Amino acid sequence: MATVDKIRSELIDKILAIKNKDFLLALDHLISSSSADTDVVELTTEQKQMLEMSEADIKNGRLISQEAMDKRNLEWLNEL
């Protein structure tokens, strides 16, 4: 698997070889817009309540394993 530094270096090499101005502008726009993903997401009241309920379930040991959940889902699907 390639390391981040190796990927970055390969991308820089490829970018340096690009001569098409429109392509470079589009690439710049793509890279610039991806940095906007760090914006804070506001949760609705309902989403906050669901998270609080989940935290309470974890705190009180109301958990189910992935294997048990998969089995429960298969049983439910077979009832349909």
Image (cartoon, rainbow, N blue to C red):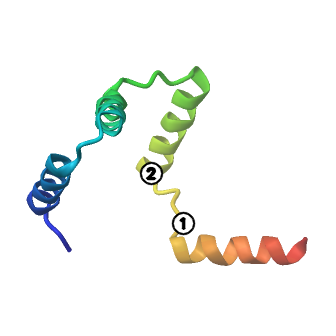
Query: In what quadrant of the picture does the N terminus appear?
Result: bottom left
Could you classify mark 2 by the number of other residues whose Cα lies within 10 Å: few (under 14), some (14-19), or many (20 or more)?
few
- Residue 8 located left or right of residue 57: left
Tell me the residue that label 1 is attached to: 64
Tell me the residue that label 2 is attached to: 58
Say what secondary structure mark 1 lies in. loop
Circle on res. 40 = none
Spot occupied by residue 22 in the image (x, y as percentages of width and height): 35, 33
- Residue nearest the observer in this picture, 62 or 31: 31
**Looking at the image, residue 71 lies above or below residue 25:** below
Q: Amino acid at mark 2?
A: Ile
Could you classify mark 1 by the number of other residues whose Cα lies within 10 Å: few (under 14), some (14-19), or many (20 or more)?
few
Residue at image point 50% right, 37% down:
51
Q: Cα distance, mark 2 to mark 1?
A: 10 Å
Point out the residue furthest to the front here: 19
Closer to the chain start, of discs 2 and 1, is 2
